Image (cartoon, rainbow, N blue to C red):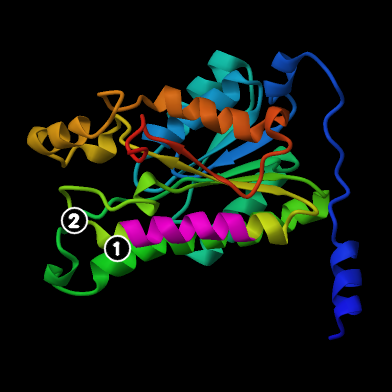
Amino acid sequence: MALDSIVNTSLKNLPTTQPPAPKNVLNLFSLKGKVASVTGSSTGIGLAVAESYAQAGADVAIWYNSTPADDKAQAISEKYGVKCKAYKCNVSEAKSVEDVIDQIEKDFGTIDIFVANAGVPWTVGEMIHAEDHKSWQKIIDLDFTGVYYCAKHVGKIFEKKGKGVLILTASMSGHIVNYPQKQAPYNAAKAAVIHLAKSLAVEWSHFARVVSISPGYISTNIGDFVSKEQKDVWLSHIPLGREGTPEELAATYVFIASDAASYVTGVDLIVDGGYTAP
């Protein structure tokens, strides 16, 4: 293809979205009238994000797999006066992901914000000592391929609407190698998530914003398998001297989902108390 044809084709795909109308800066953070969908949101970070979105005025679709969340959805709905429903889905199964996204669009009318947050940690230790390939496959299927399934299908809704916000939960482990735990597969999967977000931000720039968020050590039950001694090593490397709370992290997700971040796309935001700074 000739260079001028490539340029003309690229120009046709330039974004046509406009910045939000000027208003009080605090109003830019409101999610009122928006529909948000959060995978892996029955506990931990995902639940904190879902509740924060409800606090900001959004209707919220909660996703779960092994931990039912209907009661949590009802509690959020009653507490914040928004619509909130729970959906069971294994994000490593493409058809299940597509069916749930389609159902959410039917139930809520649309999807404005999608957070691909579901994932699992690597707990096996040194990769070469894993008994078989199943542990590797589980990490890749849930932490990376599941993100792809979600992005691919919700992206069609965003393209149809001409707008949308996709947020991928990555990890500081996509930037550095954690110590003393050995988790090479998890680190590799999260690095892939970060680059997928940047790539999609460019490909989808004419209809959606895409951002990844990389949490550091956050105090949730996902780290319950880790000994106190190991956590003490973590803390010794965090300049702020402590783990973050889910609520502190969730505030970043609210910012990215809101009009306050209307010019933010294609970046990875690290929220780690300074761990990766030195």
For the point 85% across and 75% down, the residue is 6
**What is the number of the mark on residue 43?**
none
Q: In this rendering, would 127 be left or right of 154?
A: left
Q: Main secondary structure of the magenta part?
A: helix
Q: Residue 135, relative to residue 20: is it above or below?
A: below
The residue sitting at the bottom extreme is 1
For the point 32% across and 63% down, the residue is 138
Q: Quadrant of the N terminus?
A: bottom right
**What is the number of the mark on residue 182?**
2
Q: In this rendering, would 4 be left or right of 135?
A: right
Q: Position of residue 201 (x, y in %)?
A: 66, 54
For the point 49% across and 54% down, the residue is 194
Residues at circles 1 and 2 in contact by the CB criterion of under 8 Å: no
* Secondary element at tag 2: loop
Q: CA distance from mark 1 to mark 2?
A: 9 Å
The residue sitting at the left extreme is 229
Q: Position of residue 21 (x, y in %)?
A: 87, 26
For the point 33% across and 32% down, the residue is 218
Mark 1 Cα shell of 10 Å, populated few (<14), some (14-19), many (≥20): many
Q: Position of residue 34 (x, y in %)?
A: 71, 32
Q: Position of residue 122 (x, y in %)?
A: 25, 55
In the image, is residue 274 part of the stretch drawn in magenta?
no
Residue highlighted by disc 1: 185
Q: Which residues are magenta?
A: 187-199
Residue type marked 2? Lys
Q: Quadrant of residue 231?
A: top left
Between residue 268 and residue 152, name the one nearer to us.
268
Q: Quadrant of residue 184?
A: bottom left
Residue type marked 1? Pro
* Secondary element at tag 1: helix
Q: In this rendering, would 39 be left or right of 14?
A: left
Between residue 252 and residue 277, name the one nearer to us.
277
